[in-house]
Image: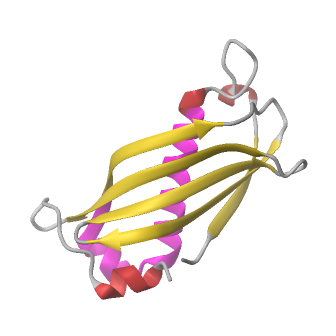
């Protein structure tokens, strides 16, 4: 599947009491990159008709990130079936190329009209190829 990536720099706002990136920030970054990817590839018509909700998220934390680290966040959709899609997010220290965390997140496509889960169309599935 087609990867999408972004780069951020760790700020004081991202840190916890141990002076490394708070685990909650990783979850936020997972959500943020998914949204950025959707906003970039979906047509205005598709965005008017559908939205995604997070069903489950599993993160494996490998190494810590610290203030002023440059973080590379990569994502891609690994599977889309029925109403669900699985998105992988990998978070790296850009300077060392070390994997900091990896997330597997299950998302559900929702119809804005019905507010209920709806099957992923081939048009939407093809956006991620």
The residue depicted at 34 percent of the width and 57 percent of the height is 107
Image height of 128 relative to 61, above or below: below
For image coordinates 20% across by 74% down, the residue present is 119
Instruction: Reply yes or no: does residue 81 show up in magenta.
Output: no
Q: Image quarter for residue 110?
A: bottom left
Most common SS among magenta residues = helix
Q: Residue furthest right?
A: 95
In the image, residue 119 above or below residue 65? below
Query: In the rendered image, which quarter contains the N terminus?
Result: bottom right
Q: Is 88 placed above or below 17 here?
A: below
Q: In this view, does 62 lie to the left or right of 126?
A: right
> How far across and down, in percent of the image, does residue 99 sit?
74, 47
Quarter-of-image position of residue 121: bottom left
Side of 128 where 10 appears, left or right? right
In magenta, the rendered stretch is: 25-52
Q: Position of residue 19 (x, y in %)?
A: 76, 18
């Amino acid at each position: 599947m087609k990867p999408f990536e972004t780069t951020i720099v760790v700020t004081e706002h991202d840190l916890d009491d141990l002076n490394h990136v708070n685990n909650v920030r990783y979850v936020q970054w997972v959500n943020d990159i998914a949204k950025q990817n959707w906003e970039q590839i979906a047509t205005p018509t598709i965005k008017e008709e559908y939205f995604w909700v997070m069903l489950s998220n599993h993160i494996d934390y490998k190494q810590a990130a610290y203030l002023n680290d440059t973080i590379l966040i990569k994502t891609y959709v690994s599977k889309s079936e029925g109403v669900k899609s699985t998105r992988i997010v990998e978070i790296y220290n850009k300077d060392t190329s070390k994997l900091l965390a990896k997330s597997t997140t299950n998302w559900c496509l929702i119809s804005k009209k019905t507010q209920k889960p709806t099957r992923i169309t081939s048009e939407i599935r093809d956006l991620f190829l």
